[in-house]
Amino acid sequence: MMFEDIFQNSDVGDILLRVLDGERLSFEDGVRLFRSADLPAIGAAANIVRHRLNGNRTYYVVNRHINYTDVCKNECRFCAFYKSPSDPSAVRMTISEVLDRAAEMYEHLKFTELHIVGGCNPDLPFDYYTNLLSALRERFPGVHLQAFTAVEIAHIADVGRMTIRETLKALQEAGLGSIPGGGAEVFSSRVRDALCPNKLPAEKWLEVMREAHLLGIKSNATMLYGHIETDAERVEHLIKLRELQDETHGFMAFIPLKFHVDNTRVGEGLRRQSSTDDLKLFAISRLILDNFPHIKAFWIMLGVKLAQVALSFGADDFDGTVVEEHITHRAGAKTPESLTPQEIRRLISETGTVPVERDTLYNEVTRDETGMPAILKC
Ligand code: V47
C-alpha cells in the first residue's frame, strides 16, 4: 500500500506526507499533530522514519545508574527524589561508597556505562566531582562515564567559581564521557515558574549543552511531560532542541520522560495522560526531531509493555539494565529497577525488531564467552 492510501483519510495526512517527503515540520504542524486523534497514521509515519534512520535495530546498553546524592537546593515541585540538607535520611555518598556501589554488579554484568546523577548539593566541593570521575576511571578503565545533568554542571561551575566551559574541561579531563539528558523538563518559562522556579533557566540548560558539544562532549536531551504543559509548549521544547542540534550535532538521543505524581508537590491542573497520548508524543517527537539520530523509550518510566509498543511509534532505543533507580520509583513507578541483558533482548525480540547492544556513543558491542565486552567502532 502507498503512503497516500494510508494517509488519505487522516486529518493530518497532508503533514505526514510532507514529513515523509523529507520536509521539516513547523510549529503549527506540531500543534496540529498533537490535536489530532489519528494515532495510527501518526504512528505509522513515525515508524517509517524510525526504519529509515535505524532500520529494524533496537539499541540497548548494559549500564548501571548511581545517585551519589539526593540533596538538592532546587526543590522542584515535580520531584519526589530530592531531600533537604537537614534530612537525616539524605544520601551523600563518599567517593569510596560510589566505587563500592559500582563494583557490586560489575563482575556480573560487565557494564559499559555508568550513569551518575544526583542533586545540586550545596555541601559538595568542586574537587568531589573531578575526584569522583578520576577514581571511577581508574577503577573501571573501559567504562564510559555518563555523568551530571546540565543543571548539575551549572551548579558545579558555581561551586568552583568557574565558567561552564572551564568546568566542562575539568570534568572532561577527569573522565567525563558524555552528559545525560536530564534537567531539561519543559523549556517554557510559564511551566518552569510554576514547577521549578529555582532551577537553571531553559536558556542556560541549552547553553551548557552547546558548550559541551563544542568541546566534543556528546549528550542526550529529555522532556518531562504529562503535567501542566500545553501542546504548544511541548512543540516549542522540541523545536528548541532541533535548533541547537542544527548548530552542534551533539545530541545522541531524545528521551520523553513520563511524569509520575506520587510524593510530589504537583497537585491540581494535571493533564490526563493516557497510553495513547504517550505513544503520540513519541511519534511526534520522532517526526519533529529530524536531526536526532535516536529516540529512547526509557522502560523504567514508561513501563516495560508500553516501552515495547513505543518501538513501533518512533523509538529505537530501550535504554538499559539500570540496576538501581530512585528518581521515578520514589514518585510511584511500579516497574522493576533492573532488567537483565537477556530479558531486554527477549523483550526487544518480542516486538519483531533486532536487539543490538550498544555503548553510550552508539557503537555496537560484542561479548566473548566470558561476557567481556568489545566495542566495534562505527
Ligand atoms: O531530570 C524528576 C525527571 C530526570 C520526576 O540521558 C521525573 O540517557 C518522572 O534524565 N516523574 C532524570 N520524571 C532522569 C533522566 C534520564 C533517565 C534515563 C536516561 C537518561 C539519559 C536520562 O527525571 C530529571 C527529571 O526531568 N524526573 N522527577 C517524576 N516525578
Image: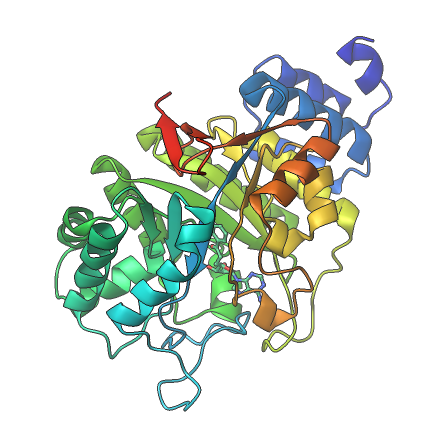
131 relative position to 322: left or right: left
Above or below for 212 versus 196: above
Pinpoint residue 92: horizontal percent, then vertical percent. 33, 77
Above or below for 211 versus 349: below
Identify which residue is drawn at 41% across, 52% down: 107
Pinpoint residue 333: horizontal percent, then vertical percent. 65, 65
295 relative position to 207: left or right: right
Regarding residue 354, the answer to whether it shows in the image is: yes
338 relative position to 102: left or right: right
**Which of 354 and 15 lies nearest the eye of the viewer?**
354
Quadrant in the rendering for residue 355: top right
Pinpoint residue 113: horizontal percent, then vertical percent. 39, 46
Above or below for 376 versus 245: above
Question: From the image, which quarter does the C terminus lie in?
Answer: top left
Pinpoint residue 372: horizontal percent, then vertical percent. 40, 37
Among all residues in the image, which is located at the extreme front?
A: 369
Which coloring applies here? rainbow
15 relative position to 66: left or right: right
**Which of 28 and 1 lies nearest the eye of the viewer?**
1
**Which of 56 and 192 lies nearest the eye of the viewer?**
56
Quadrant in the rendering for residue 351: top right
Marks counted in the figure total 0
Identify which residue is drawn at 59% across, 37% down: 285
